[in-house]
Amino acid sequence: MAIRITFRPEKNQPPIVQTSQVQPLTSGADSIQEPQRGRKVIHNVAENKDIAEILAELDALVGLTTVKRLINEIQAYIEIQKRRTREKLTAEPLVLHMIFRGNPGTGKTTVARLIGKLFKEMEVLQKGHIIECERADLVGEYIGHTAQKTRDQVKKALGGVLFIDEAYSLARGGEKDFGKEAIDALVKAMEDHKNELILILAGYKHEMEWFLQTNPGLRSRFPIHIDFPDYSIDELLRIGDSMLKARQYEFTLEARDAFRFMLQGVLNSHPYAGNARLVRNMVEKTIRKQAVRLYQKSSSSREELIRILPCDLSLDEEDLK
């Protein structure tokens, strides 16, 4: 039996944990396996350097406070079940399939990759890799083709995470669309490989809610729903600073003010475009424009190569896509 974790919509409220019965653990993605003989037993997360590094990487992400809290709760719960198993206590098997809801550029793919690595170190997944796909990777052109394409993606993901972006597109074509065949194949794979696979479906919040309503059996198979909020202006600025710093660039004070003004204009006119993907596009274009400006000079000082000026900033409609 599975433990059902329902996350409340209110902030700072703990999730609701429901179980129908308690049973001993078995191996796999929806359960915790007792350590094998000869394998080092980790009695504290702090003793596992790799887990600590992954959690630190998660914590270093800008914003996503609620997302981080929920993942830490899931990680802590898994660890405690492992401790209960070592003490010969009954422990709860877990269903870890997830729904990620949020606008583009809010960190869904980044967090999915970290979850794969985290669950590998916790011995929930064998490999912890992530296979990213969308409708075109799953839906075929004729009857029977879709099921095979979907099985191929599932096979690649065994031992790790299968991450499907814009998953709601699988149900948009109606009953006769081949997307329904992909959904059926995924549901079957979740049963056939429940010990080897974690499925994460991602997309816009409202579209994902509609998607779950198209198939009554889907919602119960995805007990963990995580909402990814849009970034604030200050968070977007921090993301921009971080991206530039990683490339050994930095804004002048005037350029940073200009960058903030541009971001505010985007949020006012395109409320769903103001996320990390937009910032990355703007940063990459800014670096290119700075290069063109400096290339016109015969030489450049170290400071000039680092500084981003207001004249290096630009934004067009292509950056909003």
Image (cartoon, rainbow, N blue to C red):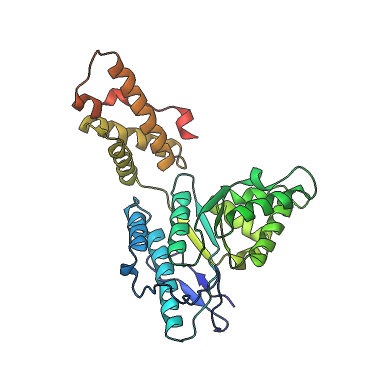
x and y, in percent, of residue 203 in the image: 55, 50
x and y, in percent, of residue 90 in the image: 49, 85
x and y, in percent, of residue 148 in the image: 73, 51
x and y, in percent, of residue 22 in the image: 54, 84
In this view, the residue in front, 10 or 315, is 315
157 lies left or right of 115: right
Q: Against 248, is 218 above or below?
A: below
Q: Against 152, is 313 above or below?
A: above
40 lies left or right of 159: left
Q: Against 17, is 161 above or below?
A: above
In which quadrant is the N terminus drawn? bottom right
34 lies left or right of 222: left
In this view, the residue in front, 303 or 159, is 159
- Look at the image and tell me whether residue 149 can be seen: yes
Which residue extends farthest right? 143
Figure quadrant of residue 287: top left
Report the number of discs. Answer: 0
Q: Residue at x 43, y 61 (%)?
A: 118
Q: Residue at x 25, y 13 (%)?
A: 297
Figure quadrant of residue 274: top left
- Look at the image and tell me whether residue 308 can be seen: no
Q: Residue at x 42, y 33 (%)?
A: 281
